[in-house]
Image: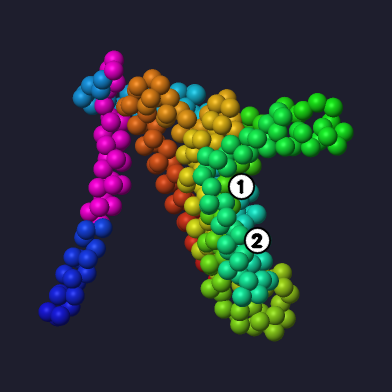
Amino acid sequence: MAKFDAEARAGLSLIAPPFLYAALILAAPILTILAYSFLTDGYLEIIGDFTWANYAQVFTDPIVRTVMLRSLMVAAIVTLATVLTAFPIAYYVSFMVRPERKAMWLFLITIPFWTSYLIRVFLWKVILGYNGVVNSSLTGLGIIDEPLTFILYNVNAIVMTLAHAYAPFAILPIFVALEKIDRSLLEAGRDLGESRAMTFWRVTLPLAMPGVIAATLIVFIPTIGDYVTPEVIGGGKIPMIANLIQVQMLALDNRPLGSALAVTAMVIVALVSLLFLFLNRRFLKVRQ
């Protein structure tokens, strides 16, 4: 017992410094924003009077409601498109590529990480712009007489850019989950007379769900709070919740309302994530 207590104290002493550091770096800003959200905005200052008015405005303002719904819609579409695109790629690398070449494929998948996210967003603006690569190619081939104006500064362009930016984040966790699947289970399913499609549905997909869940959350959480892509690709005409928070925090200097928007967005993301995890757990129980 004494030995166990000594080992426990040694373990706590090891994890205490990084835990305190994480609490300071992560918890302190969140608690600060939470505290600000209950304060009153004054002219170029924050009045220390407790109020629910900021949250009342968040839930009653039609502009905030529209922007929040748009953010959820865009994040959901981007997540769905990214995961559906990433799964076949991860499956191919895991099951079709020879073991000695998998490292090269993973290397190629991570190449987009070599450049800044901001640079990649601006490249999509160059590709989709009025005189960009797409319009120049179509005009040069004689397919169109004048450049298209509807392929940029809209939701579709934002979804395309975000799906491309977060694709590697979705491919890697799904690949790791597929790599952990015991291939003998797949062989056993086929030996019992199951087709490849049914083996995939009953064995491969349920076992790969942890990777799919991780990919979904990794893409959904940062996408809903993305600021750069709606500003650049959307031309500032299709704001999402992060753009609205920026306007309140900096342009209008209304930090209490901006904090209330940020806290509301975090709570919604947490609830959606927990709901997805709950539904996935029910799915796994049904499949078992």
User: Camera-side residue: 77 or 231?
Assistant: 231
Residue visible at 73% across and 74% down in the picture? 195
Give neighbour class at mark 2: few <14, some 14-19, many 20+ (Cα, 10 Å).
Answer: some
Judge whether residue 94 can be spotted in this image: no
Q: Residue 151's x, y, as percent?
A: 70, 33
Residue visible at 21% across and 60% down in the picture? 16
3D distance between C-alphas at marks 1 and 2: 13 Å
Residue marked by disc 1: 164
What type of secondary structure mainly makes up the magenta span?
helix
Task: Give yes or no for residue 22 being in the magenta stretch.
Answer: yes
Residue visible at 74% across and 37% down in the picture? 134
User: Camera-side residue: 8 or 100?
Assistant: 100
Q: Residue 244's x, y, as percent?
A: 46, 28
Mark 2 or mark 1, which is nearer the start of the sequence? 2
Amino acid under disc 2: Ile
Residue 206 found in image quarter: bottom right
Residue 21 lies left or right of residue 93; in this view the side is left
Whether 32 is drawn above or below 190: the answer is above
How many badges with numbers are in the image? Answer: 2
Q: Residue 256's x, y, as percent?
A: 32, 27
Amino acid under disc 1: His
Start-end of magenta stretch: 19-44
Residue 149 lies left or right of residue 155; in this view the side is right
User: Camera-side residue: 39 or 140?
Assistant: 140
Question: Which dot marks residue 40?
Answer: none
Whether 223 is drawn above or below 110: the answer is above
Residue marked by disc 2: 89
